[in-house]
Image (cartoon, helix red, strand yellow):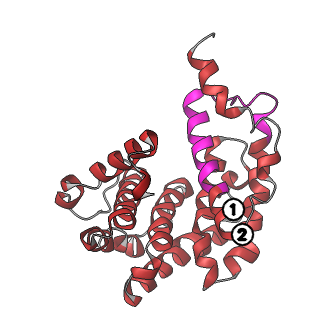
Amino acid sequence: MNSNNSANPTPYSINTSALASAGPTLFDQAHVERVLTGPRLLSVSRELLIRSYCLSFAYRFTGDRKYLTAHSTTPKPFVLFRIGTFLFLDVAEMLHGVAIGYDWLYADLSKADREILREGMKKHGLHEYEKRSGEWWKQSRKQSGIRCNAGLIVGLGLAETDPTYAQELVPRAISNLSVALKNYAPDGLWYEGPAYWSYATEYLSYGMAALESSLGNMQGLEQYPGLRETGLASDGLRSPN
């Protein structure tokens, strides 16, 4: 990927943007802290998610260990957060951030850091999902249902040491996703409007990519009517042409 930058302007632009995002600003920021916005933890989850993506990518792309070191402090507070009273949407986005670092950096994480992330994913992902068996979002037709279930699927990297994740939770999450995916039919538009279309489709893409990377296929999710057309949906919303 690195050697093809000059020949491929679009990847080059994306790579440059990602590296810039992992620059001094992230290094200067304090560690992710449990600061609530009202009753919500979502802003903290998203901060962790952005830091994890940017620093993990920067390390994989450059090999510079300063990014690995900076990442190592980012998700650790997640393990200590008390999250039992929060919406699972907030938890799922945080799980997503931890899972990306765990997967992308696994070979270079210290054994201790690897175990910290693993325990955090089990505690706040696997155990929390099981504990909240009757909650509405599990089989919701809304975009929040996709974000919760796809966020859990992104944690598939945990399956190597905890096979229950792949054997039990992921099939349940895939089944739950089917309720919401029917809303893409017939033309790829989303009934909650363009902003929620963006949320739903972004997280669905994360989940499908995780399935393909870990299991070799997307478990049939790509076959739902409307998904093939949804990539053009935003164009139709922006312009009559």
Judge left or right: residue 141 versus residue 86: right
Q: Secondary structure at mark 2?
A: helix
Q: Amino acid at mark 2?
A: Leu
Question: In the rendering, at what x and y percent does residue 138 appear?
Answer: 70, 56
Q: Amino acid at mark 1?
A: Glu
Q: Residue at x 35, y 74 (%)?
A: 76
Q: Based on the displayed image, in which of its 4 quarters is residue 201 positioned?
A: top right
From this view, report whether residue 113 is shown above or below residue 225.
Answer: below
Q: Quadrant of the N terminus?
A: bottom left
Answer few, some or many: residues within 10 Å of disc 1's Cα (few below 14, many 20 plus, some between 14 and 19): few
Q: Which residue is mark 1?
A: 212
Q: Residue at x 54, y 31 (%)?
A: 195
Q: Is 53 inside the magenta-drawn segment?
A: no
* Residue 188 is at least partly visible in this image: yes
Q: Nearer the viewer, residue 155 or 5?
A: 5
Judge left or right: residue 63 versus residue 45: left
Q: Main secondary structure of the magenta part?
A: helix
Q: Residue at x 60, y 22 (%)?
A: 235
From this view, report whether residue 156 is shown above or below residue 48.
Answer: below
Residue placed furthest toward the front:
7
- The part of the chain drawn in magenta is 182-208
Question: In the rendering, at what x and y percent does residue 230 appear?
Answer: 69, 33
Question: In the rendering, at what x and y percent does residue 26 appear?
Answer: 24, 57
Q: Is label 2 in contact with label 1 (beta carbons under 8 Å)? A: yes
From this view, report whether residue 218 is shown above or below residue 124.
Answer: above
Q: Which residue is mark 2?
A: 215
Q: Based on the displayed image, in which of its 4 quarters is residue 192 positioned?
A: top right
